[in-house]
Image (tube, rainbow, N blue to C red):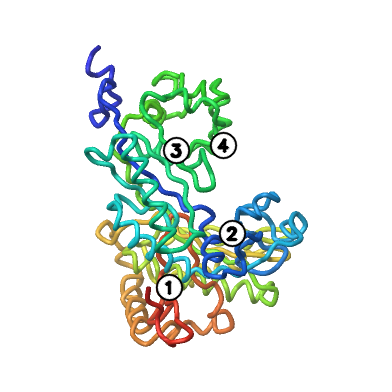
Amino acid sequence: MPYTDIMVDESLPFEHRARPLRYLFLDLNSYFASVEQQDRPELRSKPVAVCPVMTDSSFVIAASYEAKKFGVKTGTMIGDARRMCPDILLVDGRHQLYSHYHRWIKQTVENVLPIDEVCSIDEMRFRLLGDEREPAAAREIALKLKATIAREVGECMTSSIGIAPNPFLAKLGTELQKPNGLVVIEAQDLPHKLHDLKLTDFTGINRRMEARLNAAGIFTAEQLCGAGRHRLHEAFGSIVGERWYYLLRGFDLPSEKSRQKSLGHSHVLPPDLRTDGGCKEVLLRLLGKASARLRGEGFWTKQMAVTVKGKQKTWRAFTNLPPTQDSVTMTDHFLKLWETRDFVSPMAVGVTFTELCPEEEVTPSLFDETVSRSKFSHALDRMNKKFGKHSVYLAGIDHAKDTASEKIAFGKTELFSEGKGDNELIDTFLGRPFER
């Protein structure tokens, strides 16, 4: 078989290469809800939903397995959750606590096996080496990880573990048995072990991609696994389809690190801020918070989107920016967009920056003040870091400055600090940052 015929490109492995067990993927079950049950014993064995705002129009961000039995899940409206499970216990999200438990669990599992990559606040990947790749040894390591977390962190912190020849299948394995599952997928099991799955069970296939695959004549996992490289290329519309051909068969491909494309914040409005003025203040608060994070991560942006989600009518607006990371420049552009607003009955707001680029790739305009303004914004950041969050802030957010506290979003493991002491977990008994 010609070299070029068995390779998608120079980075892909030969089809005849051995496919031992190489990766262990750990997914903490119902993480936010489990942390609440571990931290508050009175919640254990009861249906629990973690919520951002205690209003029926808000939504559940995590549900315990006791709540999931009633159909309550992430994204369920709180009002619906109450109807589905009248005895459900609603708790406010405590993101500092979730971040603290994340660090605690990381320290704990490192005593068993070095972490290869932290994928999100509730997901970690480990690489298996040498004799660890033997199925019995890999299973023993997985059981030891589970036992160590239960002993050192708490019995409520259960996890599902997948073990497979590549990270894609190892992560998929965590979805096959929940809660507290352990699934080993060996090369000899492929691809028939995947045939009973739904297309949307595969990470990377959402409803839109499912429709695209259906249009290409692929309706089942068995058809997906049985399709050749070229057909998958056509079905996915890119070389990604050819990668899938290899991944489904257990080949370990080089990872594709994608560049961050956007950064932003959103917030469900409390009832007293569901007004025109309230929306404006919270959006200015989110803009300032997002721009500080932009500077903290070393990015500049070229585009901004603003959204007010209304119960009756939603408003969205976009604007191009000169390359900037400056709060004042962004505020000027926001105020121009604000004049076009036409939302009705606001419920939530959001600000998103897109077309991000690192500073070394930025060529600022010679006729724009954004560079000098950026230095001013950095100076304000330093003052807040030294003296505390909101030591200096725009006057326009005075009534909303304490809204939109930092949350754990998908793929994020730590809370961004806007100033000294921000997002520290305080031991109320000792009156100082909590230590474990």
Residue type at mark 4?
Answer: Arg
Q: Which mark is residue 327?
A: 1
Residue of label 3: 183
Viewer-nearest of discs 4 and 2: 2
Residue type at mark 2?
Answer: Ile
Local secondary structure at mark 4: helix
108 in relation to 41, above or below? above
Foreground: 2 or 128? 128
Distance between the Cα atoms at labels 4 and 3? Answer: 28 Å
Distance between the Cα atoms at labels 3 and 1? Answer: 48 Å
Local secondary structure at mark 3: strand
First along the sequence among labels 2 and 1: 2
Residue of label 2: 61
Neighbour class for label 3 at 10 Å: few (<14), some, many (≥20)?
A: many
52 in relation to 241, above or below? below
Residue type at mark 3?
Answer: Val
As drawn, is 112 to the left or to the right of 432? left
Q: Residue at x 62, y 71 (%)?
A: 279
Which quadrant, please, contains the N terminus?
A: top left
